């Protein structure tokens, strides 16, 4: 299985899971899964932009991926405590 297929499957699973939790009313878990989804998509965009030679845009996507990773940890800690 290549990287694009693995990313597509993980994005689909995270999207469906966050939608299910959103419908059930578990907003904290839904937001947690959405932030993880943003981490995955932004890190994939970073790698793609860097390979295409778009250095500034890749740097921006890397910053967004790091930001959402930090937010994921903060939300996870908030949920657990």
Image (cartoon, grey):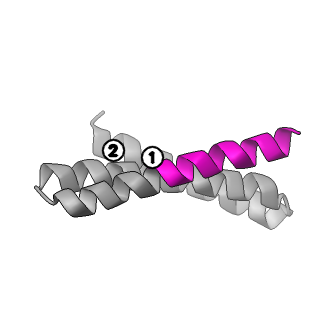
In the picture, the disc for residue 39 is none
Main SS of residues in magenta? helix
Is 76 colored magenta in this rendering? yes
Q: Residue at x 84, y 58 (%)?
A: 26
Q: Where is mark 2, residue-wise? A: 5
Residue 73 position within the rendered picture, expressed as x and y whole percent measured from the top left = 66, 42
Q: Nearer the viewer, residue 81 or 36?
A: 81
* Quadrant in the picture for the C terminus: top right
Numbered range of the magenta stretch:
66-81
* Above-or-below relation of 71 to 25: above
Residue 12 can be seen in this image? no
Q: Where is mark 1, residue-wise? A: 9
Q: CA distance from mark 2 to mark 1?
A: 6 Å
Is 17 colored magenta in this rendering? no
Report the side of 49 relative to 43 (left or right): left
Identify the secondary structure beneath mark 2: helix
Do the numbered discs 2 and 1 sit on residues whose CB atoms are within 8 Å? yes
Q: Residue at x 15, y 60 (%)?
A: 54
């Amino acid at each position: 299985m290549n990287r694009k297929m693995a990313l597509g499957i993980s994005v689909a699973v995270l999207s469906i899971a966050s939608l299910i939790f959103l419908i059930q009313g578990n907003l904290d878990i839904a937001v947690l899964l959405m932030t993880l989804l943003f981490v995955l998509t932004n890190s994939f965009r970073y790698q793609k932009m860097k390979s295409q030679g778009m250095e500034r845009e890749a740097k921006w996507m890397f910053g967004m991926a790091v930001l959402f990773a930090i937010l994921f940890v903060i939300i996870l800690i908030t949920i657990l405590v």
